[in-house]
Image (cartoon, rainbow, N blue to C red):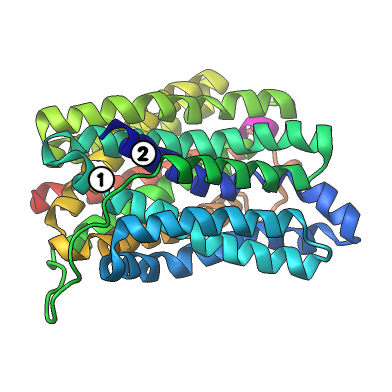
Amino acid sequence: MRNQIWALALAMMVGAMGISIANVALPDIARDFGETAQGANRVSVVYLAAVTVAAILVGRIGDRFGRGRVLRAALVGSAGASVLAALSPTMGALIAARAVQGVFGAALMVLSVGLVRQVSGPARSGRVFGALGSMSALGTAAGPVIGGVLVDLSGWRACFWALAGLAAVAGMVARIPDGAPPVRAGQGAPRGLWIGYLANLGVAAVMMGTLVVGPFFLSFGAGLSTRMVGMVMAVGPVMSIIGGVLAGRAVDRFSAGPVARLGSWLVALGSFTLALLSPVWGVLGYLIGITVLTPGYQLFQAGNTSAVMARAPEGAQGGVAGALGVARNLGLLIGAWGFGALFTCVLGGVPVQSAGAGDIADAVRVVFLVACVGMVGLGVLLWRWG
């Protein structure tokens, strides 16, 4: 069983790292292919788009043909698509390879979640969901670091060779049963699952808000250098890596519902702390808020995912996991656009580099108060859901 859990964790890491590892290589890709920054950014956008669009489809394919079988095929496909990306002779070929890579990446992340209860059993599923959350955070955080080293040593193509190798390693240890039989005609997901999807969307939006607004506050409001901004922003991912495992253990001990509700309230409290202390105490206030918000996020993720998957029909867990992934990705998109627009609106449309520190502090306060109110509403919804 341990090897199977490691296979799920590595598959999750490959999918998450595929999102972030290419970002640091975009300047080199633009230079090699004579692209603008916006043109090179398509390499990242197409992967995210493919992951979002394909999530539910690959989950249902897993339910139909066996989640373990489809996950193993996705590892092979991800390795192959990464090789194609590394060998791409043109920008168009690279974008096409990244689109294919995104489809397989969706399968890796969705089916890893869909297989947890089958591999671990209900009694230990919480800690495995928590471990997957940690591996997702690790893949997202490690991608730019590993990518930066590889680009410096061997160029941007090395990033995709590394992804191919990691997918191949995961494929070699993936000895996972195929899964439950196909969904019977007329079998559907309980309506209560929509509350879990909505909560996943809302919390993801708030977390993306911290990633969008945080750098502007730290750079222009607190006056930190780019390097220091990166170091402060790294606190959240590091805490997520540690907190995911602990959150999973909490789910197994106290059950999923209470842990998800506690996590949502901690995200609300963290948002309120960011609104209250960041404008006054600067970097210290921001760090205090993050140390409350990030563990809350991991508690919510482990609890909500466990609760939703426990309610999923046995033969439809791939599709339900895919819907959770789509909700999360939509939340990230809504958070990036919505909180970014709110921040700009409070600044009165003035470019942030031209705004005063007091105006930036006011904008941060409004953004995180709105996030707090939204999270309180979600907390009430989760409480009523049980």
Residue 297: quarter of image: top left
Q: Mark 1 points at which residue?
A: 116
Q: Where is residue 349 in the image (x, y as percent from the top left)?
A: 66, 56
Q: Which is closer to the viewer, label 1 or label 2? A: 1
Give the amino acid at mark 2.
Leu
Q: Give the range drawn in magenta.
A: 217-221
Q: Mark 2 points at which residue?
A: 132
Work out whether residue 34 or residue 88 is closer to the camera in this orientation and state it.
88
Q: Are marks 1 and 2 in contact (CB under 8 Å)?
A: yes
Left or right relative to 178: residue 315: left
The prevailing secondary structure element of the residues shown in magenta is helix
Work out whether residue 354 or residue 149 is closer to the camera in this orientation and state it.
149
Q: Residue at x 78, y 45 (%)?
A: 156
Give the amino acid at mark 1.
Val
Q: Position of residue 368 (x, y in %)?
A: 43, 41
Residue 58: quarter of image: bottom left
Q: In which quarter of the image is the N terminus?
A: top left
Counting the numbered discs, the total is 2
Q: Position of residue 149 (x, y in %)?
A: 74, 31
Q: Which of marks 1 and 2 is nearer the N terminus?
A: 1
Q: Which residue is drawn at 41% across and 46% down?
A: 206
Query: CA–CA distance between discs 1 and 2?
Result: 9 Å
Q: Residue at x 37, y 32 (%)?
A: 293
Work out whether residue 277 or residue 159 is closer to the camera in this orientation and state it.
159
